[in-house]
Image (cartoon, grey):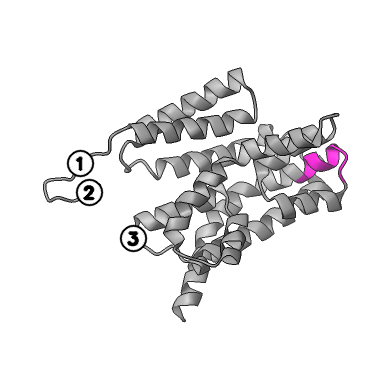
Amino acid sequence: MSPTRTDFFQGVRDCLPIVAAAAPFGMLFGALAVDNGLTVGEAVLMSATVFAGASQMVGLEMFGAEIAPWIIILSVFAVNFRHVLYSAALGRRMGLMPGWKKALAFFFLTDPQYAASEARADRKMPVTLTWYMGMALPVYVFWVAEAWVGALFGSLITDPAALGIDFLLPIYFLGLVMGFRARPNWLPVVIVSGLGSILGFYTVGSPWHVSLGALAGVVAAMLLPLPGPDAKGRMP
């Protein structure tokens, strides 16, 4: 098998935990979309074009209210502002690419996609576009399909929390965060980010607390000194 095909199918294998963890929320979105007045087709179209679970949920809450469109757009931007930081960090991992390839890659950029890319780089493995798309495409296809299934059959599950379904994705994200615990200053950055998000939630409110927590973590990382080289002169 050629290196390109090997990279692609490695990405497909790496995406399987993401597909499993995100499935309940993809279906939940479809069910909530229909409950909020969208058709099955509109729910599927929203998942296919927005492809951002938190932003889609925020949009659903606002579509039914008499809110100016620019406020909806600004709120969605607030939720997804962290992706600006993701793309800046990931761009240096993937090297120089033509503009259309960057646009394509970053359309599929999600929290798990970014975390998996950083973890791969930590293992000194190249973050190639082929591997990246091998991981991204199944996640995208299943996310759209899950919206369709949820829109059609979501009403059959009246209480996802009773089945523990609502807890799957937070556990997965906790695992992603723990995967970076070997990095310098990991614990103080996580603490500052978490406190910033909690403070933002209780002062400014949702969805702004997501971006505020991310910014607090970035500021903490900038202010904290990096450890010096070890006895052999190697940087951490």
Q: Please rate how many residues cluster around mark 1, counting C-alpha atoms within 10 Å: few if below 14, some from 14 to 19, many from 20.
A: few
- In x, y percent, where is residue 169? 58, 41
- Is 216 contained in the magenta span? no
* Vertical position of residue 208 compared to residue 113: above or below: above
Residue visible at 47% across and 74% down?
6
The stretch drawn in magenta includes residue 32: yes
Pointer 1 with pointer 2, Cβ within 8 A? yes
Decide if residue 158 is in sight here. Answer: no
> Dot 1 corresponds to which residue?
228
Which tag is nearer the camera, tag 3 or tag 2?
2
Using the image, tell me which numbered label, if any, was put on residue 85: none
Kind of residue indicated by mark 1: Gly
Furthest-left residue in view?
Answer: 231
Q: CA distance from mark 1 to mark 3?
A: 21 Å
Amino acid type at circle 3 is: Lys
Numbered-mark total:
3
Marks 3/2: CA–CA distance: 15 Å
Q: Which residue is mark 3?
A: 124
Residue plotted at (57% across, 64% down): 99
From the viewer's perspective, is the residue at label 1 or at label 3 nearer? 1
Q: Which mark is residue 235?
A: 2
- Does the CB distance between marks 3 and 2 fall below 8 Å? no
Q: Is 169 left, or right, of 33 in this rendering?
A: left
Location of residue 221 with respect to 12 vertically, above or below: above
| Inter-mark Cα distance, 1 to 2 | 6 Å
Where 43 sits versus 138, above or below?
above
Q: Quadrant of residue 31?
A: top right
Q: Which residues are magenta?
A: 30-38
Based on the displayed image, in which of its 4 quarters is residue 226 positioned? Answer: top left
